[in-house]
Each structure stands twice: as structure tokens, then as C-alpha cells.
Image (spheres, rainbow, N blue to C red):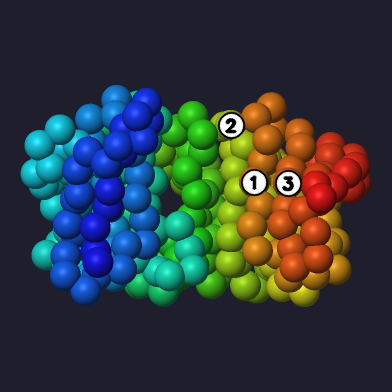
Amino acid sequence: DGCAIVWSAWSGRQLRRLRHGLKVRLFEVHVFPDGDRVATLGSDERALIWSTASGEVLQRLRARGEKVQGPRKHHAMWVFPQGDRVVTGASYAWEDPVVVWNATDGKALMRLAQLGDNIRAFELSPCGTRLVTGGSSSLVVWDAESGRQLVELAGRPKWVSGIAVSERAEKVVVNSIAGWLLVFDGVAGGITHHLLLYATVFAFAIFPGGRMLVAQSNSEVGIWDMELGLRVGSVE
């Protein structure tokens, strides 16, 4: 019904319903670190920041008067761990594919784009200092504070459908076709390992510490050591 629901973690009681819009499907819901705000992204291509206490909309994020697009298959929004900024992304968009916003006043702080490229996936590092974008012709690590391009990763796949990033993007993992996960050195820019899962990969994430990776395919949930490039276990 186009609503995000705020619940009490102590009692399990429903506290408030945030109506993003009628006949709207919510793609993304993110809680700010302070717990006082929620960001939502819907199929109406609007990104909204809400007060969890009052239920009112605090900010509406729009890029140059256009709607913020929310792709169905990719993460389209992240809240920075400091709670001061929000980043949104538009898949297959040539203009303003990734925008970093001020969460307080709703103004765009920077726009990250490779000339002649369209973004297919992006990921914010857990510490909030790095952004990684994957497009039709590039895979780039950015400084999330300045918007400066730090390194372009070499040997990227032709099709990027998902990205995982370690704490400061020392490691970047990219989902390719045919059951491969590619592990990159996010500083030097090269591929360190090819992880073959022999199946379609649905989801994957890097463990805290940056060495281990968990990946879900249509056959299992496997755990990989990215230093060795070896599968070390599975989850039943």
C-alpha cells in the first residue's frame, strides 16, 4: 500500500505508518543511525526523508528538477553511517546517475558520473568514505567526501549486476555472469581472485574485517576466503 511501518523494537508494537504514496511499491527503506529519521525510495521515483516521531516528510530529494530513479534490481539508496548524507542512484541513467545529498537541507552536494557511461550498480563502503560505481564501461572507486575518482578497476566484467565493498574499499567484489564473483584490489585496481560458484549468484556480502565473503546462489550459501580465493565452508 505504499507505506513504510515504524515498529517498537522493545514491544513489537506498530508506532507509525509512513505513506510514501498510493499504489507505490517501496524499493528501499533505510533507518538513519540516530533512529529519528527514515529514508524511502519508491516506484514513483521519489526519495523522501521522514521524521519517525511525527511522520512528516522532512526532505524530498530531486536532481535538477528530475525524479530520482529507483532501479528494481540494484541498491538505489544508502544512508551514510554519520547520518549527514544520503546517496541515490539511477540505473541506466546518463545524467546524474549517482548523487550525494545533504540529509538536512535536501541539497545535492556532488554528482558522480563517468563520461559516456551509465551506472548499473553502486555501493557505499561501511565507513562511508568510499563509493564504488559499476557501469557499462567502467568500475570506479570514488572518494565519497570530495567526489574525486581514486582508481578505475581494471579487468571488470562486461555486465555488473552487484557490488560488495570492504570497510574502506580495500576489496571490491563484483557479480558477473555465469556464476563468477570477481575480487578486486580496491587500492591497486587489479583482480586478485576469480571465485567460481557454478550457479547464479543472488546475493553476496563481505564480513567485517574484509577477508571473508558469503555468497548465496541457487544451490547453496557458501563462505569464501578472499585472501586465498578458496571456498572454506557453507551454510545449510
Q: CA distance from mark 2 to mark 3?
A: 15 Å
| Residue nearest the viewer, comparing 97 with 17 | 17
Tell me which amino acid carries mark 1: Ala
Q: Residue at x 35, y 72 (%)?
A: 94
Circle 3 Cα neighbour tier, 10 Å, few/some/many (<14 / 14–19 / ≥20): some
**Can you give x and y, in whole percent of width and height, for residue 55 in the image?**
13, 42
Residue annotated with mark 3: 214
Residue annotated with mark 1: 205
Q: CA distance from mark 1 to mark 3?
A: 6 Å
Residue annotated with mark 2: 167
Q: Residue at x 60, y 66 (%)?
A: 160
Using residue 222 as the reference point, say whether residue 158 is left or right of it: left
Tell me which amino acid carries mark 2: Glu
Judge whether residue 191 can be spotted in this image: no
| Residue nearest the viewer, comparing 146 with 101 | 101
- State which quadrant residue 51 falls in: top left
**Can you give x and y, in whole percent of width and height, for residue 141 in the image?**
53, 46
